[in-house]
Image (cartoon, rainbow, N blue to C red):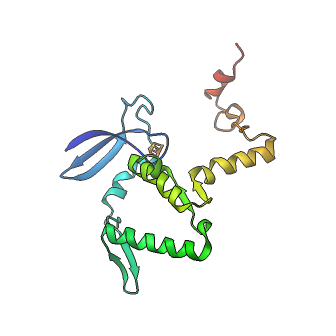
Amino acid sequence: MTTAPATCCLCDALCGLLVQHENGTVTSVRGNPDDVFSRGYICPKGVALPDVQNDPDRVRQPLRRTERGFEPVSWDEALRDIADRIGVVQERGGRDAAAVYIGNPTAHSYAAVLFAVPLVAVLGTRNLYSSNSLDSAPRQLASYFMYGARTLLPIPDGCRSSRGGNGSCDCKRRHAKV
Ligand code: SF4
């Protein structure tokens, strides 16, 4: 059994991990207490990484949907097929008929970032989306309509909630007048 330090790339928190593995199989993932940012804390998605890694149904190579079901194809074949289909879509509907979505896995992969820029340039579409389109931008719009400014955020009143009502709430100290 070997333990290796790693970084979780599922989201921007980039938590430090300790990954236990044996004979090429990940057996457990836990927080790395020596990580200067996360200090041993990780969320359930980080703990569940071995389930994703070891899932027998995990997609490990390109698959093409056919009348007989999904069939494995080479990367060259898959990329050629996708390029042909995007060409057909843009021929019929114009350049904006294609849309690009860039999420965290792309942002945390230098290869994906390097190739995303020329791909977007070649497609020439104005339809670009990211994880920001799904979470931050709608939250900012909601804050604008509800509070009058997109940067305003509600903060839970822990001191007066049932959770903080036992007097142990840390926000009492943070809110305390000095
Ligand atoms: S462990 Fe959770 S919070 Fe930390 S980087 Fe991974 S997904 Fe994000």
Residue 87 appears in view? yes
Q: Extreme top residue here?
A: 178
- 33 vs 124, nearest the viewer: 124
Tell me residue 136's x, y (percent).
64, 47
Tell me residue 31's x, y (percent).
38, 38
Left or right, 108 with respect to 153, comes to left
The structure residue drawn at horizontal position 57% and vertical position 63%, both measured from the top left corner, is: 99
- 146 vs 155, nearest the viewer: 146
Q: Extreme bottom residue here?
A: 67
- 2 vs 123, nearest the viewer: 123
Tell me residue 107's x, y (percent).
47, 47
The structure residue drawn at horizontal position 69% and vertical position 31%, both measured from the top left corner, is: 159
The structure residue drawn at horizontal position 38% and vertical position 71%, both measured from the top left corner, is: 80
Residue 45 appears in view? no
Q: Is residue 87 above or below residue 132?
A: below
Q: Quadrant of residue 152?
A: top right
Tell me residue 74's x, y (percent).
30, 70
Q: Quadrant of the C terminus?
A: top right
**Number of numbered markers:** 0
Q: Is residue 174 above or below residue 104?
A: above
Q: Is residue 14 above or below residue 90?
A: above
Q: Quadrant of the N terminus?
A: top left
Q: Quadrant of residue 97?
A: bottom right
The structure residue drawn at horizontal position 44% and vertical position 41%, both measured from the top left corner, is: 42
